[in-house]
Image: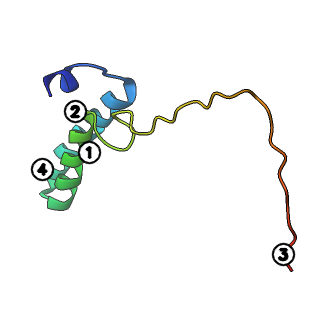
Amino acid sequence: MKNRILNNWTLPRILRVAIGMVIIGEAIFRADLISGIAATAFTGMGVFNIGCCGSGACYTPVKTGNGELKDVQCEDVV
């Protein structure tokens, strides 16, 4: 967990944390619980590098093949 927090800081990750901190400040200033919960989740995603693509979950392997195209048969449906 320590490794995940301290390494791989990219610009989008820094921006997520910074924007989340600003929203947390605004939520405290305005005493808004819903914004505070959303901002805490947003900041946590940046700090722990989790979320949709934060941990490399969106990685798709590159197809390697011999480069041959297959003949596709099409049928008309009436």
Whether the residues at callouts 2 and 1 have beta carbons within 8 Å, the answer is no
How far apart, in angstroms, are the residues tagged by discs 4 and 3? 61 Å
Q: Residues within 10 Å of mark 2 (few under 14, many from 20)?
A: some
Residue 78 placement (x, y as % from top left)? 86, 80
- Residue at x 23% of width, y 53% of height: 38
Q: Which of the numbered marks, if any, corresponds to residue 60?
A: none
Q: Which residue is denoted by mark 1 in the rendering?
A: 42
Q: Quadrant of the N terminus?
A: top left
Residue 24 locus on image (x, y percent): 18, 45
The answer to whether residue 7 is seen in the rendering is yes
Residue type at mark 3 is: Val
Query: Image quarter for residue 56?
Result: top left
Q: Image quadrant of residue 68?
A: top right
Q: Is residue 74 above or below residue 29?
A: below
What separation in Å lies between label 2 and label 1 (alpha carbons)? 9 Å
Name the residue that disc number 2 marks: 47
In-front residue for pair 77/18: 77
Residue 40, relative to residue 2: is it above or below?
Answer: below
Look at mark 3 in the image and give the residue it sits on: 77
Q: Residues within 10 Å of mark 1 (few under 14, many from 20)?
A: many
Task: Tell me, for residue 28, which label it has, or none.
Answer: 4
